[in-house]
Amino acid sequence: MADDPDGDALKALEKRIAQVKAGPASKKNGQDHHAMAQQGWRMVIELVSGLGIGFCLGYGLDVLLGTMPIFLVVMTLAGFAAGVKTMIRTSKELQDETLADISVKDKGE
């Protein structure tokens, strides 16, 4: 019977080992401000790139067709809408990741 380990102590040790193994992978929950800044810059770049692409396409069409302000305005607004849509999709992905991490953390405890 001396060779038989205590069940509670063994379970506590296994839980602690699992926490140590999951340590670096679970750092995602405690993101520092640099990671949040990266996400913010990603969203800004998505919006600005949508505006830039729309502006360039509109300007190019206006030069080719000789209708200076029409396509420039329309395509710039379309680029803005596309940029906003992309930003919303990105924020939804980030929200889903955060909720998944929280639910995994809750199940582990």
Image: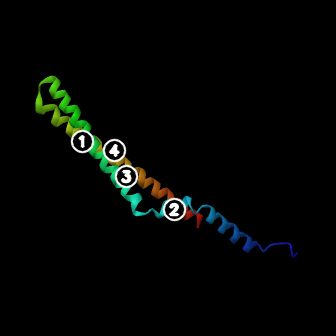
Q: Which residue is mark 3?
A: 91
Of all residues, the one furthest to the right in this rendering is 1
Question: Which label belongs to residue 51?
Answer: 1
Mark before the other along the chain sequence, 4 or 3: 4
Q: Are marks 1 and 4 in contact (CB under 8 Å)?
A: no
Q: Are marks 2 and 3 in contact (CB under 8 Å)?
A: no
Q: Give, as a three-letter code, the residue at label 1.
A: Leu
Residue 16, position as x, y percentages in the image: 65, 69
Element type at marker 4? Answer: helix
Q: Quadrant of the C terminus?
A: bottom right
Q: What residue sits 56% from the left and 58% below the top? A: 25
Q: Give, as a three-letter code, the residue at label 4.
A: Thr
Label 2 – label 3 distance at C-alpha: 20 Å
- Indicate the colouring scheme: rainbow
Q: What residue sits 33% from the left and 44% below the top? A: 86
Label 4 – label 2 distance at C-alpha: 27 Å
Q: Which residue is mark 4?
A: 86
Question: Which label belongs to residue 33?
Answer: none
Label 1 – label 2 distance at C-alpha: 35 Å
Q: What residue sits 19% from the left and 27% below the top? A: 61
Vertical relation: 9 (above or below) 32 = below
Q: Are marks 4 and 3 in contact (CB under 8 Å)?
A: no
Element type at marker 1? Answer: helix
Q: Which quadrant holds residue 37?
A: bottom left
Q: Which residue is mark 2?
A: 27
Residue 38, position as x, y percentages in the image: 38, 54
Mark before the other along the chain sequence, 1 or 2: 2
Q: Which of the two marks, 2 or 3, is nearer to us in this view? A: 2
Viewer-nearest residue: 5 or 60: 60
Label 1 – label 3 distance at C-alpha: 19 Å
Mark 3 Cα shell of 10 Å, populated few (<14), some (14-19), many (≥20): some
